[in-house]
Amino acid sequence: MSGDIFKFSFPTQIVVNARGRTTVCTPLNPRDSYVCGISGNDITITIINLSNPNNFSWQMTNIGNPGSVAPSSGFYNIKFFTPQGYLVSEFKNEPTAAVTNTIPANLTTY
């Protein structure tokens, strides 16, 4: 899996680099390593090493919830590529997993 690439896009209502802080993604398993690239709401994770090739998980900091309690649109452009750029798999059932903010948001612009 070394060099494989996982790409996805956050719903447009999600704020990457929220509150002026840089979004960082890190593996949940400290034995795993990869490089995370962020461009707007598009995320690219390039795998360096996975201790278990059947388990790939990460966390991301400084992500802002939708600005209202209405559900967001879904995640999209979910794809896996080989290091050479060949498409291995693509999630076709889009949109997926809406984000719902159950606590009303504070007004930031009025």
Image (tube, grey):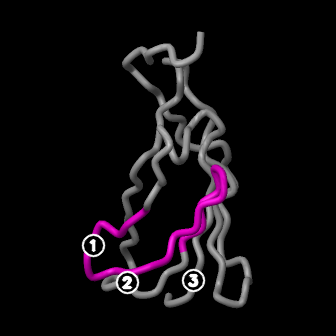
Q: Residue at x 50, y 34 (%)?
A: 99
Q: Residue at x 73, y 83 (%)?
A: 85
Q: Nearer the viewer, residue 107 or 12?
A: 107
Of the numbered discs 1 and 3, the one sitting upstream in the chain is 3
The tally of labels here is 3
Label placed on residue 50: 2
Identify the residue position indicated by label 3 in the image. Answer: 4
Identify the residue position indicated by label 1 in the image. Answer: 29
Magenta-colored stretch includes residue 110:
no
Gap in angstroms between the C-alphas marked 1 and 3:
17 Å
User: Label 3 is placed on what type of residue?
Assistant: Asp
In terms of secondary structure, where does tag 1 sit?
loop
Q: Image quarter for residue 90?
A: bottom right
Q: Residue at x 65, y 85 (%)?
A: 82
Of the numbered discs 2 and 1, the one sitting upstream in the chain is 1
| Magenta region, residue range | 25-45
Q: Image quarter for residue 87?
A: bottom right
In terms of secondary structure, where does tag 2 sit?
loop
User: Label 1 is placed on what type of residue?
Assistant: Asn
From the image, which quarter does the C terminus lie in? top right
The dominant secondary structure in magenta is: strand
